Image (cartoon, rainbow, N blue to C red):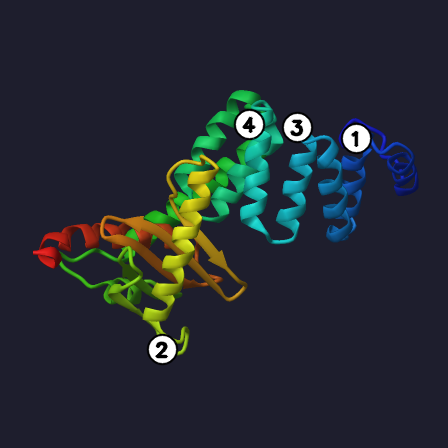
Amino acid sequence: MTGKTRRSLQELSAEVATNPGSTAFVELAEAYRERGDTERALRLCLRGLQRHPTHAAAHYELGRIYEARSERELALDEFGIVRQLAPDHLPGRLAIARLYLEEGRLEDAERELNRAGRLGEREPAIAALRKELAAARAEEELIRASAPEPERRSLATLAEEHPGTLGILLVDGDGQLIDGEMKAGEFESGRMLAVTLSGARKESERVASHLQLGKLKRIVIESPEIRLTVSPATRGFVVVAARGDSPPGQAELLLRRARELSDRETPEATG
């Protein structure tokens, strides 16, 4: 709340309680989030948005709450709503760029940063994120240079060349495993994982189509220990499983290489 005098929780709570239509719920939710009480902050924001569904600042705060709760996809959804409601909302643009960077979606992050730059090029946060983007690109180049691609290789070989990668799968549209494997002990069965993620992918595509969000590019499922990244390919979809502490850009690089490998082998597999 830069440039404004912060009101106490008691003052804000009293205003929200006596005036249900007040937008002070945004400031109150922010105060609770900063104290670590994300559950109360979440309830406040959701209840307030029922009365003020187009309040951009409220959607931004809700995104911050979801981010604090490690619910990244929900956070991106809310920041996306902010972008639609208020295209000039700089913090919302920067929040999207930051999350894209953390996911290794460097092209998407660069696009958001370029748009943010037109809103406030001198904003220190933009310079900081540009620096992070440059470092991520350098890391991606280093990963690429450390694993020169032979003329022919398997998905298993591709996974072995990158520490922290637990496996790569190529799965067809029906959930049948075409190629690849997971390291023993990490998952009960690569084939079972393929079937499970096939259902998740179809449901995600259905939701994306229903909400008119455009073509689904990827699904990221993560826990502190493991990150699964799913992306469409010519012959179905590719799954990259990596340890939670692996470089974020590594999954994006492996997805691209796995798709390229799959596309080169398509005539041989289908002929």
Residue tagged 3: 54
Please tell me whether residue 138 is drawn above or below residue 18 in the rendered image: below
Where is mark 1, residue-wise? 23
- Residue flagged by tag 1: what amino acid is it? Thr
How far apart, in angstroms, are the residues tagged by discs 1 and 3?
12 Å
Residue 194 seen by the camera? yes
Is 99 placed left or right of 16 in the picture? left
Q: Residues within 10 Å of mark 3 (few under 14, many from 20)?
A: some
Q: Residue at x 74, y 53 (%)?
A: 39
Whether the residues at callouts 1 and 3 have beta carbons within 8 Å, the answer is no
Alpha-carbon span between mark 4 and mark 2: 45 Å
Marked residue nearer the N-terminal end (2 or 3): 3
Q: What residue type is disc 3 on? A: Thr
Disc 1 packing (10 Å; few <14; some 14–19; many ≥20): some
Label 2 sits on residue: 184
- Above or below for 14 versus 261: above
How far from the left and from the top, in percent, is residue 126?
A: 55, 32
CB under 8 Å between discs 2 and 1: no
| Crowd band around label 4 with a 10 angstrom C-alpha radius: few (<14), some (14–19), many (20+) | few
x and y percent of residue 231 in the render? Answer: 35, 50
Q: Nearer the viewer, mark 2 or mark 1?
A: 1
- Residue at label 4? 84
Instruction: Give the Cα separation between the discs numbered 3 and 4.
Output: 10 Å
Residue 104 makes an appearance in the image? no
Quick one: quadrant of the N terminus? top right
Q: Earlier in the sequence, mark 1 or mark 3?
A: 1
Tell me which residue sits at (14%, 59%) in the image. Answer: 152
**Disc 4, SS:** helix
Displayed quadrant of residue 214: top left
First reached walking from the N terminus: tag 4 or tag 2: 4
Label 2 sits on a secondary structure element that is loop
Residue at 53% from the left image edge and 47% from the top image edge = 73
